[in-house]
Image: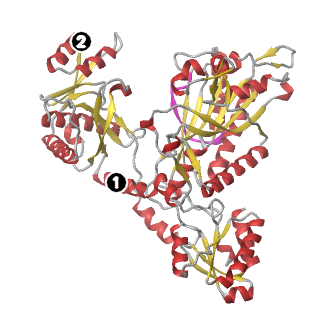
Amino acid sequence: SSSSFRPELPAGGAGLRMASTVTEKGGQKQQAKEEEEQIELPTNENSEQLLRIRHSAAHVMAMAVQRLWPDAQVTIGPWIDNGFFYDFDLGGKTFEEEDLKAIKKEMQSIIKKNYPITKEVVDRAEAKRRILELNEPYKLELLDAIPEGEEVTIYHIGDEWWDLCAGPHVEKTRDVGPKAFDIERTSGAYWRGDESKAMLQRVYGTAWENPQQLKAYKKMVEEAKKRDHRKLGQELDLFSVQESAGGGLVFWHPKGGRMRAVIENFWKDLHVQQGYELVYSPHIANVELWKQSGHFEFYKDGMFDQMEVEEEQYQIKPMNCPFHVLMYKNSPRSYRSLPVRWAELGTVYRYEKSGTLSGLFRVRGFTQDDAHVFCLPDQVADEIESILDLTEMVLSKFGFDKYEINLSTRPDKSIGGDEVWDLATEALVTALNRKGWEYSVDEGGGAFYGPKIDLKIQDALGRKWQCSTVQCDFNLPERFKLEYVASDGTKQRPIMIHRAIFGSIERFFGILVENFAGEFPLWLAPEQLRLLPINDAALPFCNDVAKKMRGSGLRVEVDGAAERLQRKIRNAEIAKIPLTAVVGDKEVETGSLAVRQRFVGDLGSMSVAEVQDAMLRAVH
């Protein structure tokens, strides 16, 4: 029946819950089965034991490598989101697949011996003596980087191996489960990330609290490979990166372009409803603007080189903020006219090294869903709360309803007085408390120009993605001398709030592709219905139906290829089209469509008007 069309797909929670169900009935049994199998994977943030396991696993790996290759020099070996890595200088050797197997086997041997892992505090001179004795120049550089007066610590594995390290670690090597870790891959990495320095061999591993978590993680990794947005983007013809035109520059193909238009139109309409004005700004500006804003000083390495225009230096924009500041300054402002809320889908360009570029997740040109609010001090809490409400509205539309929230407070080096920092931080806390959202506090983790809230969304595989940011800014209003006339007639500085919800259209689109595994909800799908004529006689009817439905805003295509029906059906399956309709002589005579819904099956014969009405209800 027509009521079986659903406007949205469930986004899923942690673990391996698929996001492809398009009807209430169609996926309930499968979903229940998958939820039973789910394991909530811990993170470094919520399990200190896991963090210790991963850090110690890195040390065990370094010990194993130096057992197998005694001339290998060790550098750094931190824990990371899903495991750990260690960088080695092998004097030109590169690790092969067989080497990784040998490293894992040696690690298991070390773990099973259950060596104690012990901490030793040493003075700087003694640490230097030991490092020189081992001929570990990288460790010497790390020692020199430890600030004077700070404790120097060494961690030992038994009596055989040690590393300069601040910890923390587990107590014994067997606390790293011999069946709860794996060695994943190897890659090259420059020392300190500097291309002018030595190329090292980086080995990545993963470690968990128990074998069940490792199994769940591996299952998630396999599922993530199937969902890789680069792979699906190519298969579904959504976008490409044309290397001949330059790395990190995204080409949106017609299908991806349709989806982007849907996303942007939804975003614009909702912002206007919520009291924002849409603005547009140039793509380049005189470099003096970036010097005045401070971006040139702080972010120069992430900006493209300047271009000369009539003996002046122009800069392609790396961010939108200074443009909105100039617009604010263009007219006198009264306290009665605040808050001012401006939003822009502004494309910016940032220099990224070619080795760091990755699909839509790390690019050189991207569109930020930027907004800036200029308000009075006593309006900050209400404005932040409104921003969080809007953020929730936007993200929930795409099925994201699980968030991890972080509040970052004043760092040691900052601008602005205690009063304005306290006011802004209190406003952020008040807004979060009003929302009833749990959050972590990163003391001293704010930017030098103001405190902020960061929001991570959780996808269908339980992965967390940094997307939304709400940032108070005392820097730009001061640098540009922004003012409003207060109720007592004095001129005061407004509070400026930066805000992005998607972060960038490109990155968010990549997250969407992977979250839905290319099985997009009907309202978002680039092609919502494909008509499959059995013969050429049915083509005119199909073209008329498609034209009528497109006129109502639906995305309908006709497969007029000279191929057998089974091939057309298969092509629609591969393209992950939510709805298809086979059209033969009977349908032409009766003005009806035999509709089939992906993952559900045949929905029976309906009139064209019924199908159109049902689709419109579903997408709106």
Which residue is drawn at the image coordinates 24% and 33% (left, top)? Answer: 59
Residue on which the image places disc 1 = 218
At which x and y percent is residue 47?
38, 40
Quarter holding the N terminus is bottom right
Q: Closest to the observer: 429 or 596?
A: 596
Q: Is residue 215 above or below residue 147?
A: below
- Is residue 435 magenta-colored? yes
Q: Residue at the spot x=57%, y=45% of the render?
A: 506
- Asked if labels 2 and 1 touch by Cβ distance under 8 angstroms, the answer is no
When asked about the image quadrant of residue 183, the answer is top left
**Which residue is labeled 2 in the image?**
123
Task: Answer above or below: position of 593 versus 74.
Answer: below
Q: Is residue 474 visible?
A: no
The correct choice, above or below, for 348 with respect to 413 in the image is below
In the image, what residue type sits under mark 1? Lys
What x and y, as percent, mark residue 564?
54, 81
Amino acid under label 2?
Asp
Is residue 286 toward the left or the right of residue 85 in the image?
Answer: right
Q: Is residue 516 visible?
A: yes
Residue at 47% in and 60% down: 17
Furthest residue to the front? 310
Q: Position of residue 282 (x, y in %)?
A: 71, 32
Q: Which mark is residue 384?
A: none
Helix, strand or loop at mark 2 = loop
Q: Quick one: label 1, few (<14), some, or many (20+) residues within 10 Å? A: some
Dominant secondary structure (helix, strand or loop) of the stretch shown in magenta:
loop
Query: Looking at the picture, how far across and down is residue 372, in whole percent?
Result: 71, 32
Confirm whether the magenta stretch covers residue 234. no
Q: Which residues are magenta?
A: 434-447
**In terms of image quadrants, where is residue 292?**
top right
